[in-house]
Image (spheres, rainbow, N blue to C red):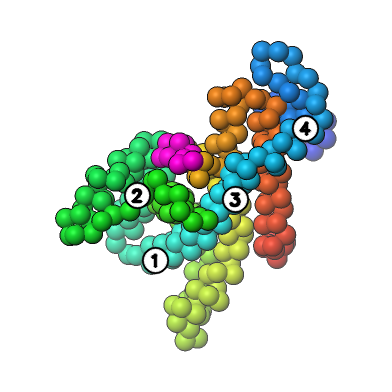
Amino acid sequence: MEKMLRSKKAILFFEAPALLLFTLILFVPIINDIWLSFCNYDAINPAVFCGVENFVAIFKDPVFVNAVKNTIFFMLFSLLTQQICGLLLAAILHNFKWGKNVYKNIIYLPNVLSSAALALLFCFLLKPKMGLNALLAMVGIKGPNWLMSVKGYLPLTLWVIGIVSLWIYVGSTMMLYMAGIAGIDQSLFEAAYIDGASRKQTFFRITLPLLKPMTKTTVSLTCIGSLKFFDLVYNMTQSGPNNKTQTIATWLYKQGFQFFKYGYASAMSVVLLILCLVTTLIVNVSINTKEFEG
């Protein structure tokens, strides 16, 4: 049995079904999508090769350029807020002796609920004359138009959606960091306390450095998830007003499934794929974890 498991042919035999399934589900659609990005295709007539025409067109499209800006904004906003809040919540809850699981589940709960349902909930809460604005009116404050703002380079609506996404997804970042903290050898903290180190010093000198592999994971997941941002934007604002909250994913969806410009939409998806790959590469290069892998 051991001899068989050491055989490269046996290993390949057992891995072949998973590799075949992975190829069919992931790589074949990607290759087909790349091909369609160089074609004019409407799902009715045969695809006609047009070269880089779609890529030239999308970068001349002011809505797509604005969608790229918004997508990068959501990525940076989510990266900064979720990493800081998730890490702080994990560090605080880790030291709780009572009620840790209760608070952990409360914070994580929005992450397991339907994001579409939560988006509709916030649409109700942030209506101009209802919800939050009605409460503000009771104390004499006129609330802003939370979901219809068009003023400024980054309208208020973008910040509102970003804060809602933070509330929904910070729980997953917190859970990952809590798992990372729980995996640190407690004897390191005990030795540090014996030497006179404070909790603040142990956090910055022990916890943070040893969380680097988990930080790499959470940063990658946050960045890629933010680049594919779709559900909250689509359900809260329908990418409006006047395309001000459009993202690459929402504009791609509209071009492909409403206007049936599948070649044009495929070109956008290729740009989105490249952004995800470049972001992952930057994260891998920036956060060095070789000392932990060795």
**Classed neighbour count for the residue bearing mark 2: other residues with Cα under 10 Å, few (<14), some (14–19), many (≥20):** some
Q: Residue 290 or 30: which is nearer the viewer? A: 30
Q: Earlier in the sequence, mark 2 or mark 4?
A: 4
**Classed neighbour count for the residue bearing mark 4: other residues with Cα under 10 Å, few (<14), some (14–19), many (≥20):** some
Q: Secondary structure at mark 1?
A: helix
Q: Earlier in the sequence, mark 1 or mark 2?
A: 1
Q: Going 49% across and 73% down the picture, which residue do you hit?
A: 203
Q: Going 25% across and 45% down the picture, which residue do you hit?
A: 129
Q: Quadrant of the N terminus?
A: top right
Rounded to the nearest angstrom, the CA distance separating label 1 from label 2 is: 35 Å
**Classed neighbour count for the residue bearing mark 1: other residues with Cα under 10 Å, few (<14), some (14–19), many (≥20):** few
Rounded to the nearest angstrom, the CA distance separating label 2 from label 4 is: 39 Å
Q: In the rendered structure, which amino acid carries the disc numbered 1?
A: Ile
Magenta-colored span: 233-242
Q: Secondary structure at mark 2?
A: loop
Q: Residue 203 or 279: which is nearer the viewer? A: 279
Q: Give the labeled residue for mark 1.
A: 92
**Classed neighbour count for the residue bearing mark 3: other residues with Cα under 10 Å, few (<14), some (14–19), many (≥20):** some
Residue 284 lies, with reference to residue 239, above or below; the image says: below
Q: Quadrant of residue 61?
A: top right
**Nearer the camera: disc 3 or disc 1:** 3
In the rendered image, residue 26, in percent from the top left (x then y), is placed at 68, 31
Q: Is residue 236 magenta?
A: yes
Q: Earlier in the sequence, mark 3 or mark 1?
A: 3
Q: Secondary structure at mark 3?
A: helix
Q: Give the labeled residue for mark 2.
A: 145
In the rendered image, residue 11, in percent from the top left (x then y), is placed at 77, 33
Q: Give the labeled residue for mark 4.
A: 53
Q: In the rendered structure, which amino acid carries the disc numbered 4?
A: Glu
- Residue 80 left/right relative to 149: right
In the rendered image, residue 142, in percent from the top left (x then y), is placed at 25, 56
Image mark for residue 69? 3
